């Protein structure tokens, strides 16, 4: 079998790898969006005036940023099914299984949420207080200030951090292969086991990840500057 | 959810796993630093070729997931015939060495970026003052630039230590019996996920807390500007 035949569609492993890449993207996008939502909530909670709310958000962030991702994933996958079974026993629902996709997405989303919380917190704190006060004195309501003044600016400040988080979540998805998700890395592993050509398959995996991360960094640089055009220094000097 | 009897019985095994985790962490940090320092210096070098080489190193080892790097070393590289016959073989001989190599390369890429940024942040006046005072380059680096870099980089390096500690758990996927590996073994023997995983989680958490606290103290010691003005004791007259 020549090297190219290894990656053929159907007879080779091309379609399996493509399916793995698709699953990787599905999990990454789902947990990224979910994590961003959790992070925004937790940032607002951390900056709130309610002390218990602050403590809750800080505790959540500290735990999920300090424990290995793999451990959290295992806990959600093996522990989650067991806990659900106990919880639903009184209702007469006996057998419950959680798919690796579901448990993994939730686990990754919570981990991402802890990091996104930090990104959003910093971005919210970077919004000048004077702008918020000016908006309030113009008669805007609190929620209007949040939606029309604070968030649009905070999202700009958060942009670079949020793109980095996308790379993080993309690089964390292969951990889900440990609980049986047929992701990109797992597909290469299976192909390697069957053909004994691990090197070729993992080389392709590494190359694809490098291309994705190069594209992401290009995107970050191109649009990161654009978001700050309104305060960019005027080019050139004296005429 | 936690079963205390089981926890007591398994605690010695978990602590043995913790020792392996520490071993992985320390080796990764040492080798990572040894690789990162030259890369960081190259990153800011006058020669474009050296700069691009450093950029390539960082891109290559920071881009892909650690697990893919690790699997490449563990499953892929040993298949190449000439590797098996050369001294490179030692590097990919078993799961532990593969893990150390993969983690070190990955961490070195991150640390190189941290150090390169810190190097750029050292005021140019310090370098000029050293040169004007007749310091040869190596002494300039040893006495003036690198101490300042250490201070500037410490905060981000502390975060990197935490990432390395957490990252070592992946070694359990290539047969290394570290803290995570022990927890998995206990789970597959008892079918109780909570006791071993929560216990291991607490140990990781405490380790990370301890390291963060240590780094913070060190930061405080090294940066007088963080300490605020020293106030005179007692009534001044």
Image: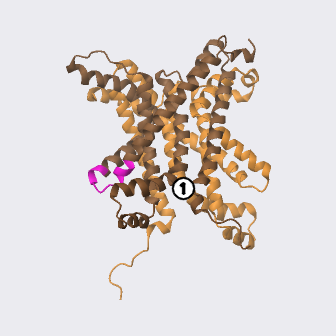
Chain colours: A brown, B orange
- Closer to the camera in the image, A53 or B128: A53
Q: Residue at the location (75% across, 23% down)? A: B85
Subunit of mark 1? B
Quarter the N terminus of chain B occupies: top left
- Residue B110 placed where, x, y %? 60, 45
Q: Looking at this rendering, what residue extends furthest in the front direction? A: A139
Towards the viewer: B228 or B189: B228
Q: Quadrant of residue A192?
A: top right
Residue B145: x and y, percent? 65, 62
The residue tagged 1 is B154
Front residue of A145 and A48: A145
Q: Residue farthest to the bottom?
A: B237
Camera sees residue A208: yes
- Most frequent secondary structure within the magenta stretch: helix
Question: In this view, which residue lies farthest toward the left?
Answer: A90
A236 sits left or right of B9 in the view: right
Whether residue A45 is in magenta: the answer is yes
């Amino acid at each position: 079998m020549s090297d190219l035949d290894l990656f053929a569609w159907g007879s080779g492993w091309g379609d399996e790898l493509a399916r793995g890449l698709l699953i990787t993207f599905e999990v990454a996008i789902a947990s990224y969006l979910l994590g961003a939502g959790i992070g925004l909530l937790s940032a607002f909670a951390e900056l709130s005036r309610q002390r218990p709310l602050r403590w809750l958000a800080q505790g959540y962030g500290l735990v999920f940023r300090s424990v290995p991702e793999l451990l959290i994933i295992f806990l959600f996958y093996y522990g989650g099914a067991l806990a659900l079974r106990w919880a639903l026993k009184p209702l007469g629902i006996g057998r419950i299984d959680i798919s690796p996709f579901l448990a993994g997405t939730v686990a990754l989303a919570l981990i991402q949420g802890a990091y996104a919380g930090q990104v959003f917190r910093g971005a919210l704190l970077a919004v000048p207080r004077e702008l918020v006060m000016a908006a309030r004195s113009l008669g805007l309501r609190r929620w209007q200030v949040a939606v029309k003044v604070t968030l649009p600016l905070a999202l700009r400040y958060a942009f670079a951090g949020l793109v980095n988080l996308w790379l993080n979540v993309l690089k964390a998805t292969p951990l889900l292969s440990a609980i049986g998700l047929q992701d990109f890395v797992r597909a290469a592993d299976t192909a390697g086991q069957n053909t004994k050509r691990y090197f070729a398959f993992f080389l392709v995996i590494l190359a694809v990840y490098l291309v994705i991360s190069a594209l992401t960094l290009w995107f970050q640089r191109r649009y990161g500057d654009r978001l700050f055009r309104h305060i960019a220094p005027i080019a050139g000097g004296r005429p | 959810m936690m079963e205390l009897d089981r926890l007591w019985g398994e605690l010695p095994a978990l602590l043995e796993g913790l020792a392996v985790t520490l071993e992985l962490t320390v080796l990764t940090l040492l080798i990572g630093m040894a690789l990162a320092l030259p890369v960081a210096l190259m990153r800011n070098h006058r020669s474009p070729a050296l700069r691009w080489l450093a950029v390539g190193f960082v891109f290559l080892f920071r881009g892909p997931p650690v697990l893919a790097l690790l699997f490449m070393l563990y499953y892929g590289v040993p298949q190449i015939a000439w590797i098996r016959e050369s001294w490179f073989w030692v590097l990919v001989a078993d799961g532990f060495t593969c893990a150390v190599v993969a983690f070190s390369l990955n961490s070195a890429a991150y640390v190189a970026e941290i150090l390169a940024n810190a190097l750029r942040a050292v005021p140019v006046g310090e370098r000029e003052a050293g040169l004007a005072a007749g310091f040869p380059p190596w002494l300039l680096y040893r006495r003036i630039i690198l101490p300042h870099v250490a201070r500037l980089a410490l905060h981000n390096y502390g975060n990197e230590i935490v990432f390395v500690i957490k990252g070592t758990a992946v070694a359990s996927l290539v047969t290394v019996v570290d803290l995570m590996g022990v927890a998995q073994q206990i789970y597959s023997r008892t079918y109780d996920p909570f006791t071993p995983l929560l216990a291991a989680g607490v140990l990781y958490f405490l380790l990370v807390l301890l390291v963060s606290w240590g780094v913070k103290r060190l930061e405080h010691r090294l940066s007088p500007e963080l300490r605020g003005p020293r106030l005179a004791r007692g009534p001044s007259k």
